[in-house]
Image (spheres, rainbow, N blue to C red):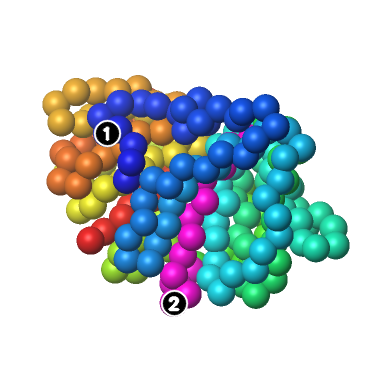
Amino acid sequence: MKETSGKVFSIAADNPPIPGCTVSKSVYSENGFDIAHFSMAKDTDISAESYMYTKLWLTDAGVLEAFDNNSSVNTVSEGQIFITPTDTPIGARAITDCVYTEIALREDTKMNEILKAGEVITLRDLLPYQEEKIVNMDLINNSHMKFVIMSFDKGTGLSEHAAPGEALVFALDGEAVIGYEGKEYHIKAGENFKFDKSGKHYIKAAEKFKMALLLTLD
């Protein structure tokens, strides 16, 4: 992925909208999967088009509207995802300045049944906190990509291990400490972090903490 590892950053801050414009940045394209960041100035749009495969739109900042050829389908706010239907023209319109990450899946990708085409889902609401526990749910899980959400009770964490592929963290709620290659980084809701393949890391929840993890595998 074309992101810098070993630092806390913000996809939204790194991709500010340009007045009157839509901007896209491809950060990954392998094995039939594509990941890109889009920044859209208020009132700009991307025309409705149909695809044979599903896309996940994860809003990093602002408010995005998904629309078909006739009317609005749904609005997607920060921390929410929209699952595009297949074979139905869907476009994107910026209600405010907005930034979103698009994850384009292969036609044969199997998703968790909780993800339904045409629906908006608030990621942090999918999992509860459990006392002294870590809760995890796979949303996408195949041989080339995983998209996982996790909740950590305060004080819980993952011991040091090596990433099996490149991984992008989306902090959804609370705060945590990420240990990466011998250094510690504090991350909070709305921020991001990238691990390189084989990068040694651990996570400790400074407060209750929820995150999404997008993992790409060779």
Q: Quadrant of residue 202?
A: top left
Type of the residue with mark 2: Asp
- Residue that numbered label 2 is attached to: 108
State the SS at label 2: loop
Judge whether residue 136 can be spotted in this image: no
In the image, is 178 to the left or to the right of 67? left
Type of the residue with mark 1: Ser
Numbered range of the magenta stretch: 98-111
Q: Residue at x 67, y 50 (%)?
A: 46
Judge whether residue 21 can be spotted in this image: yes
The quadrant of the image that shows the C terminus is bottom left
Q: Is residue 11 above or below residue 146?
A: above
Which numbered disc covers residue 15?
Answer: none
State the SS at label 1: loop
As rendered, which of 186 and 164 lies closer to the eye?
164
Q: Are marks 2 and 1 in contact (CB under 8 Å)?
A: no
Residue 4 x, y percent position in the rendering: 30, 33
As rendered, which of 176 and 216 lies closer to the eye?
216
Q: Residue at x 72, y 40 (%)?
A: 44
Q: Residue at x 59, y 69 (%)?
A: 51
Q: Is residue 63 above or below residue 81?
A: above
Q: Is residue 50 above or below residue 153?
A: below
- Residue that numbered label 1 is attached to: 5
As rendered, which of 141 and 37 lies closer to the eye?
37
Residue 200 x, y percent position in the rendering: 16, 39
Residue 104 on the magenta segment: yes
As rendered, which of 190 and 50 lies closer to the eye?
50
